[in-house]
Image: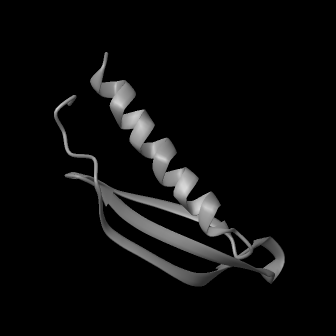
Amino acid sequence: MPDDDLALNGFRKWNDVELQAGGTTRDVTKMRFFLGRHGPFERTFDRTATDAELQQAIRDERSSLQALGNT
């Protein structure tokens, strides 16, 4: 995997609502993306999440894939 292209592909971000126990709801932001040919990866955040937090999640997933490729 060291030669894999882990560029961000197929990025999608949307607002959604999750049902919680007791019938309450939680406002969330979801994102789905591919890194090169790997994915899809999907993450759920509180609606108040910043773009920096979303970008960090992408970087974390990329680092995880790179670490797997080095084993």
Question: Where, quadrant-wise, is the N terminus in this rendering?
Answer: top left
At horizontal 60% and vertical 68% (from top left) the residue drawn is 51
Residue 39 position, x and y percent, is: 30, 54
**Looking at the picture, does residue 35 appear above or below residue 26?**
above
In terms of image quadrants, where is residue 68?
A: top left
* Left/right of residue 50 with respect to residue 30 in the rendered view: right
In terms of image quadrants, where is residue 69?
A: top left
Residue 28 position, x and y percent, is: 66, 76
Which of 40 and 9 lies nearest the eye of the viewer? 9
Which of 35 and 26 lies nearest the eye of the viewer? 35
Residue 4 position, x and y percent, is: 19, 39
Question: Where, quadrant-wise, is the C terminus in this rendering?
Answer: top left
In terms of image quadrants, where is residue 32?
A: bottom left
Which of 37 and 26 lies nearest the eye of the viewer? 37
Residue at the outermost left position: 3
* Left/right of residue 31 with respect to residue 53 in the rendered view: left
* Left/right of residue 17 with respect to residue 65 in the rendered view: right
Residue at the outermost top position: 71
